[in-house]
Amino acid sequence: MNVDRLHDDAPHNFFTRLVVVILVIVVTVPLLGLALWTAREALKPITERSDTQVFSLTFLSIVFEALPFILIGALLSGLLEMFVSRRRMLSLIPRSRFAQLLVGATMGVCLPVCECGVVVVLRRLLKKGMPLGMALAYLLVAPIVNPVVIASTFAAFRGKPEWLFMPLARVGFGIAIGMAVAALVGRGRAREWLKPDAREDDNHGADPHAGLRARQRISAACDHAVSEFLGVIPFLIAGALIAAAIQTALPRTVMNVVSGNPILSVVGMMALAVGLNLCSEADAFVAAGLLSFTAVAKLSFLVLGPMFDIKLLVMYGSVFRRSLIWRLVAAILVTVFVVMALLALVQQAWFGG
């Protein structure tokens, strides 16, 4: 009898719950809409300001522009983890230090990622046992020798007097400066300069995934990619916030003042590269549009940007200890400035500007 009564009450309970849900929706949706409309109207004096719009657009453009390349880097990192053992990685590393730097600097042709994705791949390469100097050469040069970046640089300067000089000089000086910085900073054991979660794997060269099938390795590679991707995202967001704040406060008139001096133009374009945080696959179009600057000043912008900007400064913190980061940043800035300043003086003396 009790069972029959429960069956009789079941439709009644269902309709009661349905009525409650409908009432909740009918009441909460208008209230939520009213709250959102009130918040929008209250924040209009702030959101309609030009500097607020520049900040939000800059932040969102950096994040959404970088996300696909970070994902590509995470996928490459996962594939390296599952399909390249530490023993195999060590067997591919040359013994000569110069050869290590050269191979590291040209690896970007085979592992083409931008400056956002390269940080993720770098962490996996270091865990596999790659020497610090070789890894730093890859970190600094890979976004420059990326075939897509080279093609975009040719396209950006097509029809301009420096259409051939700019892409070739970008690759040549990028490799030379990247190798020089890696040779200066990348001394000692990598383990001494890495954060604990980015140190070498303690498997003594053995492949911990030796018994897995190809399908299992691919599945595990996706798991590693998700972990790497989520680990880098907080650093990307923090760097994008700082970069957007700097770009919002950066006075545009300063660039017009410094463009006439060969040395100041290099400094100005280097500062612009650090502050704008452009992706290496798009920065050539910005440089090509800065008509008041010399070719060498534009070159300093194209070489420095993929190696160091505010966004990358924060992202480097996911791999390296702070002491190495500051050494790396100082070496990059000084080397790029010295090389480009000398080149600017040669251009001034030889061509008259």
Image (cartoon, rainbow, N blue to C red):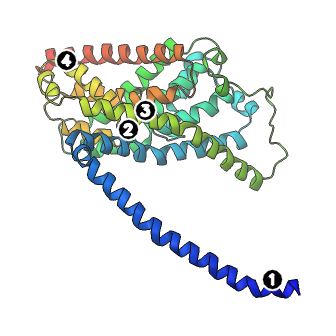
Mark before the other along the chain sequence, 4 or 2: 4
- Residue pointed to by mark 2: 280
Question: Could you give the CA–CA distance between mark 3 and mark 4, rounded to whole angstroms?
Answer: 26 Å
Say whether residue 50 is visible.
yes
- Give the answer, above or below, for where 215 lies relative to 232: below
- Residue at 53% x, 23% y: name it: 136
- Within-10-Å neighbours for mark 2: few <14, some 14–19, many 20+: many
Task: Determine which residue is flagged by label 3.
Answer: 239
Tag 1: residue type?
Answer: Leu
Q: Are marks 1 and 2 in contact (CB under 8 Å)?
A: no
Q: CA distance from mark 1 to mark 3?
A: 60 Å
Viewer-nearest of labels 1 and 2?
1
Q: CA distance from mark 4 to mark 1?
A: 85 Å
Distance in Å between CA atoms under marks 2 and 3: 16 Å
* Residue marked by disc 4: 264
* Residue 284 position by quadrant: top left
Residue type, label 3: Gly
Instruction: Give the residue displayed 74% in from the left and 84% down from the top.
Output: 9
Q: Which mark is residue 6?
A: 1
| Image position of 353 (left or right of 288) | left
Q: Quadrant of the C terminus?
A: top left
The numbered dot on residue 273 is none
Residue 76 placement (x, y as % from top left): 60, 43
Residue type pointed to by label 4? Leu
| In this rendering, the label closer to the viewer, 3 or 4 | 3
Report the front residue among 6 and 148.
Answer: 6
* Total numbered circles: 4
The residue positioned 56% from the left and 28% from the top of the image is 318
Say which label, 1 or 3, has the lower sequence index: 1
Q: From this viewpoint, is residue 105 visible?
A: no
